Amino acid sequence: MTTVAQDGRRSSGVVKEVFGLPAASRPRIVSPRQDPVLARKLRALAREYSGTAGVYVQSLTGGSGAAWNAKAQFPAASTLKLAIAAAVLAEHPGIPRPNSSVHGLMRSMITHSDNAAANALEVWLAGSTSAGSHRVNSLMRSIGLVDSEMYGGYELRTLASRIPVRVEKQPAFGFGKHTSAFDMASLLRAVWLASGSLGPLRRAQPGFTAADGRYLLWLLAHVNDAPKLDRVREGNPGVVVLHKAGWVKTARHDAGLVFWRGGVFVAGVMTWTSWGAGTSSDRLAGRIAALTLERARRREG
């Protein structure tokens, strides 16, 4: 980067770890509203899935979106590691330095979905995984996420909306960490808004700064995972997906921010089957993202 003073003097420096996003995707507050065409097509895709699906999508540029079974609670798996990251950043003084243990743990937890790193960050946050979970739950409640719950650590093995959100079918998975498509989409929206010093996360958690939001988005841009929502990049040059997935034997999810030349939309896709979720869940996430991108281009392109 080079700066030029009024007298012509120049000063240059190298800025590392930069990830560019379209100017049209700059954080802004928009009112959510249902897109009837998108809602009808999204519902058809969700109903084709052989198990139970929950979906929430919304353009964060124009506000239009749709949902299906978006408040049903699913086993959260690793998706709630995003909430752990937000809680840690709200508490940490400044963004973690590149050579710090917290940065190393954050990167392992988000980009590689490492369970041990998630547990270590909960301990860093409050002294134990159970106390850390309480802090994570408090953060989620502070921004209105009521369908999500952290229960301790991970096993060491491999908001009001004008888009109608309700429960169509509730998976019968018992107790444990859980969340919904609406909650995960809302958390991602809150992180995106906070990166521009806007929204509920910035208001409710003063320690979570705009720099923290940008840092977390940068981590999400480097997630290593089998293609899910990011399948939308196929045949769509310039599209970028920042996301956090999660999976256990019976559940497979993805939630992310999809950036394109005209703006950005958020998507949460959750799936559950009693006999085991597989790659059909990944394909559903990709089809949902492609459908939402097509509608966004028609309305906002």
Image (cartoon, grey):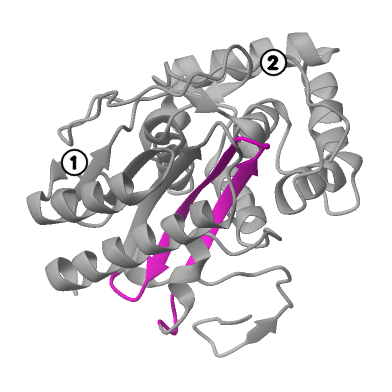
When the figure is inspected, residue 177 is found, relative to residue 212, above or below; the finding is: above
Residue type of the residue flagged with mark 2:
Ser
SS of the residue at dot 1? loop
Tell me the element at label 2.
Answer: helix
**Left or right side of 199 for 17:** right
Given residues 200 and 179, the one toward you in this image is: 179
**Magenta stretch, residue numbers:** 236-262
Q: Quadrant of the N terminus?
A: bottom right
In the image, 279: left or right of 135?
left
Q: Quadrant of the C terminus?
A: bottom left
- The tag on residue 32 is 1
**Would residue 252 be counted in the magenta stretch?**
yes
Task: Measure the alpha-carbon separation of dots 1 and 2.
Answer: 30 Å
Q: Which label belongs to residue 133?
A: 2
As drawn, 114 above or below 87: below
Q: Residue at x 39, y 29 (%)?
A: 200
Q: Quadrant of residue 180?
A: top left
The amino acid marked with disc number 1 is: Pro
Q: Is residue 139 in the magenta section?
A: no
The spot of residue 7 in percent (x, y) is: 53, 87
Give how far across and how far down residue 100 sits, in percent.
Answer: 89, 45
Q: Can residue 248 be seen at all in this image of the molecule?
A: yes
Pick out the residue farthest to the bottom: 8
Height in image: 259 above or below 206?
Answer: below
Left or right: 34 in relation to 46: left
Mark 1 surroundings: few (<14), some (14-19) or many (≥20) residues within 10 A: some
The secondary structure that dominates the magenta segment is strand
* Image point (22%, 65%), residue name: 296
